[in-house]
Image (cartoon, rainbow, N blue to C red):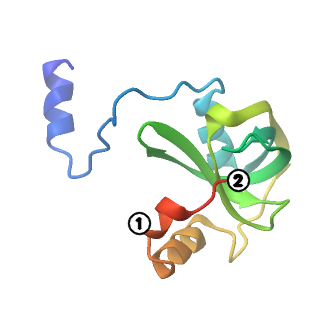
Amino acid sequence: LPERLRQLVMSQSIVAPSAGSQIPVDIDLAKVRLAIRNKMKISFDYRDEAGRASSRTIWPLTLAFFGPVWNVLGWCEMREDFRAFRPDRMREVDFLEDLFPDMPGRRLVDYVRRMEEEGYPAHHKNRKAG
């Protein structure tokens, strides 16, 4: 890192260290961030860890990096519950013009509250994605 950026990084109280090499992602995470900010739904085909395929539409709430993988955390319309999706397993991604509401029980603050109630981070290790 250039010296000016090294000083900035070293002065931060939160750091997300790399756990080795990062798993490549084919989708544009900048578009995911834009969908999160603009409350735009995302639809995609997904393959879980076991290779099972499904089509999903989600309300993206945040991007989270759990080295070495990114996760899109959001409200899944199919499951009617919070889910985490790995972008490296997402295909045929469509950033919809459909907007989702700021609905109590389906917001990021609600997701975080649930994780705390379920014992995050210990619970996170056993939580299924998708």
Q: Which mark is residue 72?
A: none
Closer-to-camera residue (116/23): 23
Question: Label 1 crowding class (10 Å Cα cut-off): few <14, some 14-19, many 20+?
Answer: few
Q: Position of residue 93 (x, y in %)?
A: 78, 33
- Residue 35 higher or lower than 74, as above or below: above
- Residue 119 higher or lower than 14, as above or below: below
Q: Which mark is residue 121?
A: 1
Q: Position of residue 127 (x, y in %)?
A: 57, 63
| Kind of residue indicated by mark 1 | Pro
Instruction: Find the residue positioned furthest to the front.
Output: 50
| Kind of residue indicated by mark 2 | Gly
Q: Label 2 belongs to which residue?
A: 130
Residue 49 as seen in the image, left or right of residue 21: right
Q: Position of residue 78 (x, y in %)?
A: 85, 59
Closer-to-camera residue (106/76): 76
Closer-to-camera residue (93/19): 19
Question: Label 2 crowding class (10 Å Cα cut-off): few <14, some 14-19, many 20+?
Answer: some
